[in-house]
Image: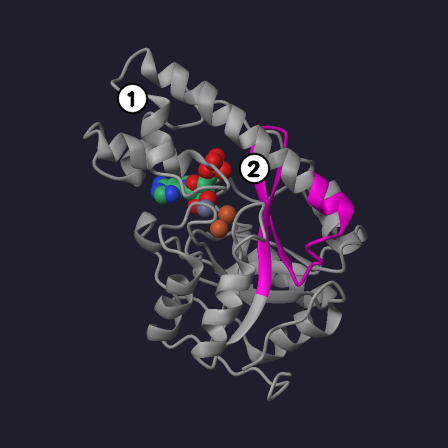
Amino acid sequence: MPTSQRFEGPSDLHLHSAHSDGTQPPAEVMASAHRHGVRTAALTDHDTTSGWAEAAEAAASLAMTFIPGMELSARHEWRSVHVLAYLVDPDEPELRAMTERIRSSRLDRARIMADRIARDYDLVWDDILAQTTDGATVGRPHIADALVARGLVRDRAEAFSGILSPGGDYYVALYAPDPVTAVGLVVGAGGVPIIAHPAGRAGLLPAKLMTRMLDAGLAGFELGHRENREPGLQTLRELCRDRDLIVTGSSDYHGLGKPNQPGEHTTGDDMVARIIGRATGSAPVYP
Ligand code: AMP
Ligand code: ZN
Ligand code: FE
Ligand code: FE
């Protein structure tokens, strides 16, 4: 039984482990967050909940509160949309089927990208497998790490701006549901959907699409994120204020895979409480 039903800030609700494209096991992610002063943390690996148990146990041993989460892949036309899914029921059949489909498509897509890259560069599929933890959600970051290991690029950033860029010859899109469907799946699994880094370089999603997502149960936006930009950010601040939406701030920590550090953006206690209060799919793990 939990000893308390209270969480303590600072809260960082967007962290990745090696169960997707972070570079550390979930327990180490929690330890890194703790070292950076974070006291409530969510693990949000792409399209998987497989890291929850390890993260929850590590969080408990550090006297932190653990919020189970996931970053669900979605797509609108050519652009990828990331839906943070907090406190979903990991066994809800429709969401589960969707994440399995996305993960399997990610694997196929990585293989095709690897074949294309292999025509021009000294890289084989085993190089990518060597960078991927067994059972992890595969993504371009693993291909990037393989390119780094082969000495073909300096770091993930160089791989993303060159060989792995969506405009390049090697890019293949992954299967992902449209954002309205993704939001509906999260709500159907008792979770709280929040759009991750909603004002990035690509700009805001069309207003009509945002309205449809809100109608489907979208709870809020991750306004605190290093990739968000003005003027989109200001538009979303006003939307969140007018509609009383949940606003989060998080690091999107990927271990050594990105410069983002745990706790660089945080979520206010009132907003964390609203997320917890709205969810029915699973519960936080309190210290
Ligand atoms: P994918 O979903 O496989 O297409 O890959 C997207 C993932 O790559 C996202 O999780 C991002 O966090 C990561 N990513 C995107 N751009 C970069 C970059 N410049 N450096 C490191 N990671 C990146
Ligand atoms: Zn990622
Ligand atoms: Fe993301
Ligand atoms: Fe992320």
Residue at image coords 69%, 36%: 178
Q: How many residues crowd mark 1 within 10 Å: few (<14), some (14–19), many (20+)?
A: many
Give the x, y percent position of residue 45. 52, 51
Task: Look at the numbered disc 2 and give the secondary structure of its residue.
Answer: strand
Is the residue under label 2 in contact with that under label 1 (CB below 8 Å)?
no
The C terminus sits in image quarter: bottom right
Is 179 above or below relative to 222? above
Displayed-image quarter of ligand 1: top left
Residue highlighted by disc 2: 80
Q: Report how far apart the C-alphas of labels 1 and 2 lie in the structure.
A: 26 Å
Q: What segment is highlighted magenta in the picture?
A: 68-97
Residue nearest the observer in this picture, 170 or 132: 132
Dot 1 amino acid type: Leu
Residue 83 covered by magenta stretch: yes
Asked if one can make out residue 209 in the rendered structure from this viewpoint, the answer is no
The N terminus sits in image quarter: bottom right
Is 7 above or below relative to 88? below
